[in-house]
Image (cartoon, rainbow, N blue to C red):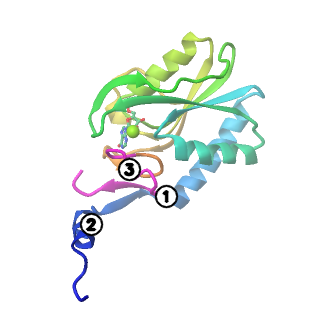
């Protein structure tokens, strides 16, 4: 066998170049700092609600950093979809709802990115209507893109106005596994 398999060549030519926007090291440092700040602000009865799917990597790192900061939160998940398989927004739908008690709870609502604000705004309303006191933490904030009146109480990084992937963020369901946050060339 001399030449390479045709499918290997096809994969090579269709793999886009991804430029690093926030490195794994920068993210780890920022997550640790956020955890210290959040740990100082919340009381003992803390509930974290992480919006899936996008926040799963951020949530996993943040809760471990919170543990090192002496915080013992209850952790729950809310599955929402605000995008279809592309990069344009659609209607928000609840997939899996939270199961924890919410009335009177101090909730930290986590998401990967605040873009138009519709997803976090929707989730915050949902939890507040059930009696929770909600503060919002997002890893990334695209400040110029807001369409809904929502602000985050804790922000990892202000994000450039580019479509980014990795560290839980996807483009058409792929790239969530990247250990850094990057921008795909051409998007
Ligand atoms: P929003 O409702 O417009 O604020 O969008 C929030 C959701 O859209 C996030 O939870 C992400 O899943 C997705 N999203 C927004 N911007 C990006 C991006 O640059 N990359 C990947 N996903 C994004
Ligand atoms: Mg997404």
Give the residue at mark 3.
Answer: 165
Q: Point out the stretch of residues depicted in magenta.
A: 170-187
Residue 183: give x, y in percent of width and height: 33, 54
Which numbered disc flags the more N-terminal residue, 1 or 3?
3
Residue 69: give x, y in percent of width and height: 74, 45
Local secondary structure at mark 1: loop
Judged left or right of residue 58, residue 95 is left
Foreground residue among 52 and 31: 52
Judged left or right of residue 87, residue 54 is right
Local secondary structure at mark 2: helix
Give the residue at mark 2.
Answer: 11
Most frequent secondary structure within the magenta stretch: loop
Residue 186 inside the magenta-drawn segment: yes
Foreground residue among 83 and 18: 83
- Dot 3, how many residues are within 10 Å of its Cα: few (below 14), some (14-19), or many (20+)? many
Give the residue at mark 1.
Answer: 179
Foreground residue among 168 and 186: 168
């Amino acid at each position: 066998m001399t030449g390479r398999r045709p499918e290997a060549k096809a994969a090579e030519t269709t793999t886009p170049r991804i430029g690093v926007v926030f490195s794994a090291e920068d993210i780890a440092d920022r997550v640790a700092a956020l955890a210290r700040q959040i740990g100082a602000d919340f009381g003992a009865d803390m509930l974290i609600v992480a919006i899936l799917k996008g926040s799963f990597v951020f949530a996993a790192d943040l809760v471990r950093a919170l543990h090192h900061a002496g915080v013992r939160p209850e952790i729950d998940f809310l599955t929402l979809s605000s995008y279809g398989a592309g990069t344009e927004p659609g209607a928000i739908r609840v997939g899996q709802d939270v199961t924890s008690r919410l009335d009177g709870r101090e909730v930290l609502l986590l998401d990967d990115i605040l873009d138009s604000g519709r997803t976090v705004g929707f989730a915050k309303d949902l939890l507040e209507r059930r009696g929770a006191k909600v503060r919002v933490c997002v890893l990334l904030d695209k400040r110029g893109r807001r369409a809904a009146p929502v602000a985050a109480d804790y922000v990892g990084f202000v994000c450039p106005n580019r479509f980014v992937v990795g560290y839980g963020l996807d483009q058409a369901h792929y790239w969530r596994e990247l250990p850094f946050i990057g921008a795909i060339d051409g998007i």
